Image (spheres, rainbow, N blue to C red):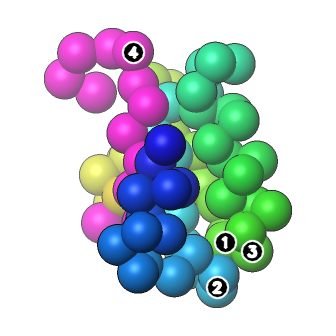
Amino acid sequence: GCLELLSRSGIPIKNKRAVVVGRSNIVGLPVSLMLLKADATVTIVHSRTQDPEKIVREADIVIAAAGQAMM
């Protein structure tokens, strides 16, 4: 759904820095793989990532898939 929204909004994914917040098997990892297939450079941020704010600020695309409040 997230990638379809980007596509319909005319936002290119190729050659973009994408950050996925969350690493669940249900959403986070599959979205990461789909972004990789679309030629994005993907970083996964999770609850144990050091300085996640810095990583997210540098991203062109952010997908929030965390199951933790206030992540």
The residue that appears at 63% across and 42% down in the rendered structure is 31
Which span of residues is magenta-colored? 57-71
Q: Which of marks 4 and 3 is nearer the N terminus?
A: 3
How far apart in space, not on screen, are marks 1 and 4 (Cα)?
Answer: 23 Å
**Most foreground residue, 13 or 20:** 13
Residue tagged 1: 40
Label 3 packing within 10 angstroms: few (<14), some (14-19), many (20+): some
Q: Mark 2 and 4 residues: CB-CB less than 8 Å, in contact?
A: no
**Residue 67, numbered circle:** 4
Relative placement, left or right, of 13 versus 50 is: right
Toward the viewer: 54 or 29? 29
User: Decide: marks 2, 1 in contact (CB < 8 A)?
Assistant: yes
Q: Mark 3 points at which residue?
A: 39
Q: The residue under label 1 is which amino acid type? A: Ala
Q: Which of marks 4 and 3 is in front?
A: 3
Asked if residue 40 lies in the magenta stretch, the reply is no
Which residue is disc 2 drawn over?
15
| SS at mark 3 in the image | loop
Characterize the local packing of mark 1: few (<14), some (14-19) or many (20 or more) Cα atoms within 10 angstroms.
many
Question: Which image quarter is the C terminus in?
Answer: top left
Q: Distance between the residues labelled 3 and 2?
A: 6 Å
